[in-house]
Image: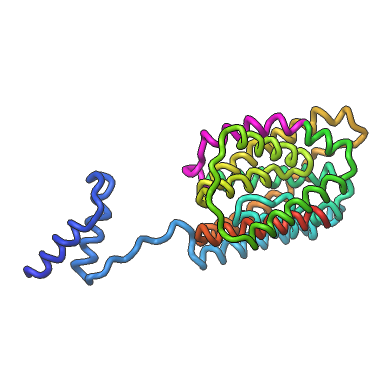
Amino acid sequence: MPSARLLLLSARLSLPWSTPAASGVNTRQMLKQLADGGKVQSSPAADPGPLSMLIVGVAGFAFLIAEGAVLSAQGIPAVAATLAAVFVASTVSGIAGFAFSALCGALLFHVIDSPVYAVNVMIICSIAIQLLSVATLWRSIDWRSLAIFLAGGLPGVPAGVYLLLHLPTTTYRHVIGVLLIVYGGYLLLRRPARSRRTGPLTDACAGFLGGISGGLAGFPGAFVTIWCGLKGWDRARQRGVYQPFILIMQPVTLVAIHLMRTSSPVQVQLDWKAFVFVPAALLGAWFGLRIFERLTDRQFGLVVNALLILSGIGLVL
């Protein structure tokens, strides 16, 4: 019929053109839908639906319960509390891509005797979380900006590790915690501000502070996250810088702790027990990423600011 042909022709003209290989299949599907019912059905989202999330959740929780029972039978203390803390912290931090160590540390510093071992557990779990997140957001990584932050962050790690091994735990935790609470509260209450133009030197300084906080508390993402927000980047670009920054800095911190532990009376424990909490971290991060995919830039900014406050509270407690 002429009307059907006219509809098909107008639909073809309204579609964005690229190359036949890239858009031919999608174009034919959309035209067929137009011819059949006059409506175009959107393709399914990349993220799983509610049923898939329910299946993953049930299977994941069943595994964690079984793992906790086995570890408890082997005499490992506070397994249930530690697994719960890792899961909750990884879920919340998976939404914004940072703050796992600070949130999880609010409990781990109270249930694990050695603060150095608690930092090791948080770093290992955080590395697993960042590997999952960076693999998911690989195309958003800003390699040029990342290199500048790393150039400043790497020299800050030894200084942070030295303070970790020689200062009382509460000293640096309270200082960093209060700063994050004050700054996060300021960002939530202030009016939206213009983006700031910054140069490589200031970016490197933010990276240096991230290196120090990473060595101190296994939390390298705080200052870099704040700085990326001040630059006015969208949520994908922010996570494309501070998440790979965290991923790279944390193994460096582990190596620095291993090399510098001989100069400190504090004994560093690196054994298989630190890896048993990785499944809980990955499950929580998976749920957090599903929530992140549904946020707008405005909502993402509010989540980041709220997590800065929660991170500070977690460090102070």
| Residue 114, position as x, y percentages in the image | 88, 45
Residue 284 sits above or below residue 139 on the image: below
Where, quadrant-wise, is the N terminus in this rendering?
bottom left
In the displayed orientation, state which residue is furthest to the right.
265
| Residue 255, position as x, y percentages in the image | 74, 31
Q: What kind of secondary structure does the magenta stretch mostly adopt?
A: helix
| Residue 69, position as x, y percentages in the image | 78, 59
| Residue 18, position as x, y percentages in the image | 25, 46
Residue in the image at 67% along x and 34% along y: 153
Q: Which residues are magenta?
A: 136-158
Where, quadrant-wise, is the C terminus in this rendering?
bottom right
Residue in the image at 55% along x and 63% along y: 53
Residue 38, quarter of picture: bottom left
Residue 4 sits above or below residue 239 on the image: below
Residue in the image at 57% along x and 33% along y: 200
Residue 44, quarter of picture: bottom left
Residue 155 belongs to magenta span: yes
Which of these two is toward me, 59 or 130?
130
In the displayed orientation, state which residue is furthest to the left.
2
**Res. 296 visible in picture:** yes
Residue 282 sits above or below residue 31 on the image: above
Horizontally, residue 163 falls left or right of residue 91, namely right
Residue 275 belongs to magenta span: no
Horizontally, residue 114 falls left or right of residue 237, namely right
The total number of labels drawn is: 0
